[in-house]
């Protein structure tokens, strides 16, 4: 009897670890189910690319890539999206992306915009990241669609050599793949690179490879499996201005009395090969345009039409070497810093101007008001590492909200100016890695009580009234020690 009891106890003690192990497995399964990233659906995997053509524009330090795809659903279930694959280095430098479905034939062909969002699926081989392009309607089995994808890369050109003298040209490296990185099988594809000049020091060969003038063509390649990758390096001349605004702070102050005041604070840098040795003004002036081919001494800013009270100054004071041309659709301000910018050099300056408020401030049907202005940097072909836009609303404004076609960080602040009682609400918008393609309109909606427009006039009237009362009291006051 004692033997049976002991054996039963031993059996019970042996069940406990197994029971704990089963509970742990159940909990781990639940955690993976609820918190693991979404995995690709089978319908997404059943796509294949019939033809692909990629065109990479290397003529500037802002790299623009155009990708044309013809996609076919070879599965049995409909597909609602297609995945675009990017290497980790490209994702870090990806500034802007859009996609569209090509409809129509030949000259009547147009592009229907499609939604593009970062995908939350697991990373692919070698850290591949994905973006999802959503179709307007599901792509049925056996159906095909033509897509056009445009995206922009920044900080992707590597100066080599990293230091050059004043009279040397700037050479850069660009690293990419001769074939398109994709999670799908590609039946036929080709890639072309366009350089700013014919001067190409070297380039990788992945046959078939052809070079003609400023164009370097790889392909066509047939029947390439998913995640194919053939690294290439192109070493070429690029003396275009590598203008990078490290930080741009724009303040837009709204006044319901008829003016919209804009003030831009710039921290500009030349992001190309660093300047080696000293700077010779005589050599720079006498050997133009070869005295400093990799530098730039002026920039073009596109301002709104009907601007007024335009000023341009740096830390020392006003800079007169600028030209303004006001047009019906836009105004152009050609600015020249005090000195030309070579690689590694920086400059800080301020551009300010005013525009009529009724051109950009409107009233909604519900009585609220909204500002419609352009997002982005007015300097042409410029990368902005960090852009901060501060919209200063009139005193008494409530419930501000922004409508922007892309994702930005938002927060609220308070600002006190002259004749303010409770202060003004400031809506702050921040975005990193901004390119000229971000120059699209955005709106700021807010509610405003017209009674607050009387606050400043009443304070002025009250101030003058108290001044007059004090003057009258002073004139009638007898402060003599004794009567005359």
Image: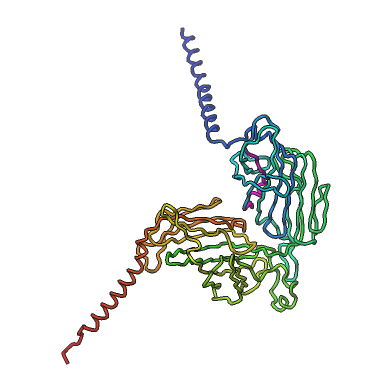
From the viewer's perspective, is 193 left or right of 82? right
Q: Could you tell me if residue 314 is visible in this image?
A: no
- The colour scheme of the drawn protein is rainbow
Where residue 457 sits in the image (x, y, percent)?
A: 35, 69
Task: Please determine whether, in this image, residue 418 is positioned above or below residue 467.
Answer: above
Q: Which residues are magenta?
A: 81-95
Quarter of the image holding residue 243? bottom right
- Does the magenta segment cover residue 140? no
From the viewer's perspective, is 240 left or right of 249? right
Residue projecting furthest to the bottom:
484
Where residue 260 sits in the image (x, y, percent)?
A: 48, 65
Quadrant position of the C terminus in the picture: bottom left
Depth check: 202 or 462 in front? 462
Task: Please determine whether, in this image, residue 253 is positioned above or below residue 99.
Answer: below
Q: Residue at x 79, y 56 (%)?
A: 215
Where residue 286 sits in the image (x, y, percent)?
A: 74, 78
Q: Residue at x 71, y 44 (%)?
A: 69
Where residue 62 sits in the image (x, y, percent)?
A: 67, 58
Q: Could you tell me if residue 472 is visible in this image?
A: yes
């Amino acid at each position: 009897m004692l033997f049976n009891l002991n054996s039963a106890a031993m059996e019970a003690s042996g069940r406990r670890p197994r029971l704990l192990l089963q509970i742990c497995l159940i909990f781990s399964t639940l955690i993976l189910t609820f918190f693991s990233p979404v995995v690709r659906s089978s319908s997404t995997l059943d796509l294949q690319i019939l033809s692909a053509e990629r065109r990479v524009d290397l003529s500037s330090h802002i790299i623009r890539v155009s990708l044309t795809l013809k996609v076919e659903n070879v599965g049995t279930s409909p597909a609602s999206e297609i995945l675009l694959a990017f290497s980790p280095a490209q994702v870090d430098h990806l500034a802007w992306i859009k996609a569209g479905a090509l409809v129509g034939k030949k000259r009547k062909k147009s592009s229907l915009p499609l939604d593009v969002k970062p995908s939350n699926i697991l990373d692919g081989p070698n850290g591949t990241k994905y973006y999802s392009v959503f179709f307007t309607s599901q792509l049925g089995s056996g159906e095909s669609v033509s897509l056009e994808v445009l995206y922009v890369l920044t900080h992707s050109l590597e100066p080599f050599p990293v230091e050059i003298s004043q009279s040397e040209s700037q050479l850069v490296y660009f690293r990419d793949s001769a074939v398109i990185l994709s999670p799908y099988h590609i039946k036929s594809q080709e890639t072309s690179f366009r350089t700013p000049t014919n001067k190409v020091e070297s380039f990788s060969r992945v046959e078939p490879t052809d070079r003609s003038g400023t164009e370097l063509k790889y392909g066509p390649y047939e029947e390439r499996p998913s995640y194919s990758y053939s690294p290439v390096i192109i070493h070429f001349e690029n003396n275009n201005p590598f203008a990078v605004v490290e930080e741009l702070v724009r303040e837009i102050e709204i006044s319901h009395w008829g003016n919209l005041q804009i003030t831009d604070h710039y921290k500009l840098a030349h992001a190309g090969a660093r300047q080696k040795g000293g700077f010779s003004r005589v050599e720079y002036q006498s050997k133009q345009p070869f005295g400093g081919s990799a530098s730039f001494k002026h920039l073009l800013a596109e301002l709104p039409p009907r601007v007024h009270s335009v000023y341009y100054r740096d830390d020392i004071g006003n800079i007169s070497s600028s030209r303004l041309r006001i047009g019906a659709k836009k105004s152009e301000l050609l600015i020249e810093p005090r000195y030309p910018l070579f690689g590694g050099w920086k400059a800080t300056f301020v551009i300010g101007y005013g525009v009529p408020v009724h051109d950009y401030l409107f009233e909604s049907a519900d009585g609220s008001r909204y500002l419609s202005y352009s997002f982005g940097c007015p300097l042409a072909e410029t990368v902005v590492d960090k852009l901060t836009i501060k919209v200063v609303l009139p005193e008494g404004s409530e419930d501000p909200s922004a409508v922007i076609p892309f994702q930005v960080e938002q927060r609220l602040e308070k600002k006190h100016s002259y004749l303010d009682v409770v202060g003004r609400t400031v809506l702050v918008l921040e975005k990193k890695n901004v390119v000229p393609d971000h120059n699209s309109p955005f709106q700021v909606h807010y509610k405003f009580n017209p009674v607050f427009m009387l606050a400043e006039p009443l304070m002025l009237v009250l101030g003058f009234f108290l001044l007059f009362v004090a003057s009258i009291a002073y004139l009638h006051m007898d402060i003599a020690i004794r009567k005359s």
